[in-house]
Image (tube, grey):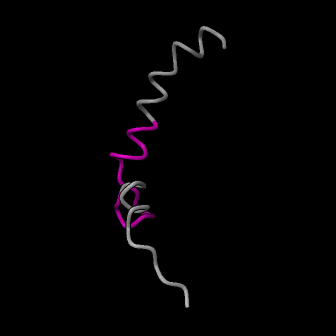
Protein backbone atom coordinates (compact mmCIF):
# COMPACT_ATOMS: atom_id res chain seq x y z
CA UNK A 1 0.00 0.00 0.00
CA UNK A 2 1.00 3.54 -0.54
CA UNK A 3 2.35 5.32 2.52
CA UNK A 4 -0.17 8.14 2.03
CA UNK A 5 -3.03 5.63 2.27
CA UNK A 6 -1.55 4.14 5.42
CA UNK A 7 -1.30 7.60 6.99
CA UNK A 8 -5.01 8.24 6.30
CA UNK A 9 -6.23 4.82 7.50
CA UNK A 10 -6.76 5.87 11.16
CA UNK A 11 -8.74 8.95 10.11
CA UNK A 12 -10.89 6.90 7.76
CA UNK A 13 -11.50 4.31 10.45
CA UNK A 14 -12.55 7.03 12.90
CA UNK A 15 -14.94 8.51 10.32
CA UNK A 16 -16.55 5.14 9.54
CA UNK A 17 -16.98 4.46 13.25
CA UNK A 18 -18.59 7.89 13.77
CA UNK A 19 -20.87 7.48 10.75
CA UNK A 20 -22.10 4.01 11.73
CA UNK A 21 -22.15 4.17 15.53
CA UNK A 22 -22.63 7.78 16.59
CA UNK A 23 -24.24 9.87 13.84
CA UNK A 24 -28.03 9.61 13.71
CA UNK A 25 -29.73 9.37 10.32
CA UNK A 26 -33.10 10.96 9.65
CA UNK A 27 -33.89 8.30 7.04
CA UNK A 28 -33.50 5.64 9.77
CA UNK A 29 -35.99 7.34 12.09
CA UNK A 30 -33.14 9.19 13.84
CA UNK A 31 -31.24 6.06 14.82
CA UNK A 32 -27.66 5.16 14.11
CA UNK A 33 -27.18 2.52 11.39
CA UNK A 34 -26.05 0.02 14.02
CA UNK A 35 -29.11 0.65 16.20
CA UNK A 36 -31.39 0.39 13.18
CA UNK A 37 -29.80 -2.90 12.11
CA UNK A 38 -30.25 -4.29 15.61
CA UNK A 39 -33.98 -3.66 15.66
CA UNK A 40 -36.15 -6.72 15.63
CA UNK A 41 -36.64 -7.74 11.99
CA UNK A 42 -40.06 -7.07 10.59
CA UNK A 43 -42.08 -10.12 9.60
CA UNK A 44 -42.93 -10.38 5.93
CA UNK A 45 -46.42 -11.71 5.31
- The outermost residue toward the bottom is 45
Task: Tell me the quarter of the image containing the C terminus.
Answer: bottom right
Can you say whether 44 is above or below 24 in the image? below
Q: Answer with left or right where residue 5 lies relative to residue 17.
A: right
Can you say whether 27 is above or below 9 in the image? below
Can you say whether 15 is above or below 4 in the image? below
Q: Which residue is depicted at the point 33% across and 45% down?
A: 22
Front residue of 11/42: it is: 42
Q: Position of residue 32 (x, y in %)?
A: 37, 55
Q: Which residue is depicted at the point 45% across and 24% down?
A: 11
Q: Position of residue 35 (x, y in %)?
A: 36, 58
Q: Position of residue 44 (x, y in %)?
A: 54, 85
Q: Which residue is depicted at the point 36% across and 46% down?
A: 21
Q: Which residue is depicted at the point 56% across and 14% down?
A: 6
| Residue 1 among those drawn in magenta | no
Q: Which residues are magenta?
A: 16-31
**Location of residue 5 (image quadrant):** top right
Can you say whether 7 is above or below 13 in the image? above
Amino acid sequence: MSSSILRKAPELSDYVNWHNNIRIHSSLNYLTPVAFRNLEPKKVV
